[in-house]
Amino acid sequence: MKRRTALVTLTAVTAAAAATAAALVLDDGGRDPGGTAREGLPPATTAIERMDLVRSTTVDGHVDHAGRRTVKTAVEGTVTRAAREGGTVGMGGVLYELDARPVVLLYGSTPMFRPLKPGALGPDVLQLERNLRDLGHGSGLVIDHRYDAATKAAVKSWQRALGVLGPTGELGRGDVVFQPGPVRVVAADAALADQVAPGAPVLTVASPTPVVRVELQAEDRALGRKGTRAEITLPAGRTVGGKVTGTVRPVPGADGEAAGAANPNGGLTVEIALDDGADAVRGDDQGTASVRFVSERRENVLTVPVEAVVALREGGYGLETVRGDRTRTVRVATGMTADGRIEVTGDGLTEGMKVGVAKP
């Protein structure tokens, strides 16, 4: 992982730097007509600027989709229609076909753990009935936990609409896959004509919402806190906002070993949700993204280059203000540093005021 940190500390502010502030002012108001430096003026000046200071760390990430999981077949059969990689499937959509019978996506939190037929009672029946109603097959259907004659009629109507040969009004374990919502088909794990046994993976799905995954080194783990803001430059060059939603759950790696939130180097793998959701990523946004974590931000503050701050003999820090050929040392309180600048506050400081800068 490449790591680029935009952070400057106050180590440049030393008594030695302060001692160099006695030679040449580089603007027109600080030179004699003959070009010689006026005694006692700093070697250069700069203006106090009001701006936002942002402390950030930039790392590499990659565009992915959240919530990857494997869909396994509950029954034995031959794949007669493989999953379409890259496609999004919603309620009532066909994920794949097994023995010429569609395997359909329905919404629900309870998995399809048994056949469903008249007499069945339970939360799986309730979520099936809700799906039937939402798909337009709920005429006369009471949404409860009971698989009754009305439920059977609704299932039979739905099976006819799907083109199922010999609709029965009953469902086998392999006919339906319940998922919390729409899914994106990440990979077809079983190809056309493959014979699959119960428990074999058929496809890998994920949320349709894109995310950016980042592996953080041990020293950057604090950036992985939920809610941390980030700016993401996508592979196509566009920049979008996002925030950390959490760590990646352990998933099987290519070699079958578990790989997930914790990395061997003590770091962390985190997911960043993009502000624009599914609209944030386009077809050309594949590959490496640049992720800039904003760990601290100070808005609309007075700032100077770090080199402008001098160490005072009595302790603390100050600025040497310059007005014409006169200088005055003003005690200041320093704040956040970033990108070579430092936040300063003090009596009489205003935007645009000229201050001395020690020659590097």
Image (tube, rainbow, N blue to C red):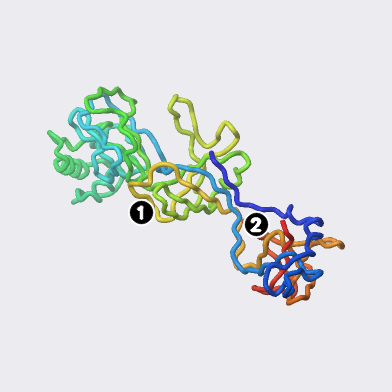
Q: Which residue is the site of mark 2? A: 340
Mark 1 or mark 2: whose residue is earlier in sequence: 1
Q: Are marks 1 and 2 in contact (CB under 8 Å)?
A: no
User: CA gap, disc 1 to disc 2?
Assistant: 36 Å
Drawn side of residue 180 relative to residue 136, left or right: right
Q: What is the number of callouts on the image? A: 2
- Location of residue 183 (image quadrant): top left
Q: Name which residue lies at 67% across and 67% down.
A: 46
Determine whether, in the image, residue 118 is placed left or right of residue 227: left
Image coordinates of residue 345 in percent, x first then y, are: 71, 68
- Secondary structure beneath dot 1 equals helix
Task: Left or right? Give the position of 288 relative to 175.
Answer: right
Residue 134 at x, y percent in the picture:
25, 51
Residue 214, horizontal then vertical, whole percent: 50, 42
Q: Is residue 69 left or right of residue 93?
A: right
Instruction: Kindly identify the amino acid type of the residue bearing the numbered disc 1.
Output: Asp
Q: Is residue 264 above or below residue 269?
A: above
Q: Nearer the viewer, residue 198 or 95?
A: 95
Q: Does residue 140 show up?
A: no
Question: Which of label 1 and label 2 is nearer to you?
Answer: 2
The label shown at residue 176 is none
Quadrant of the snapshot with the C terminus: bottom right
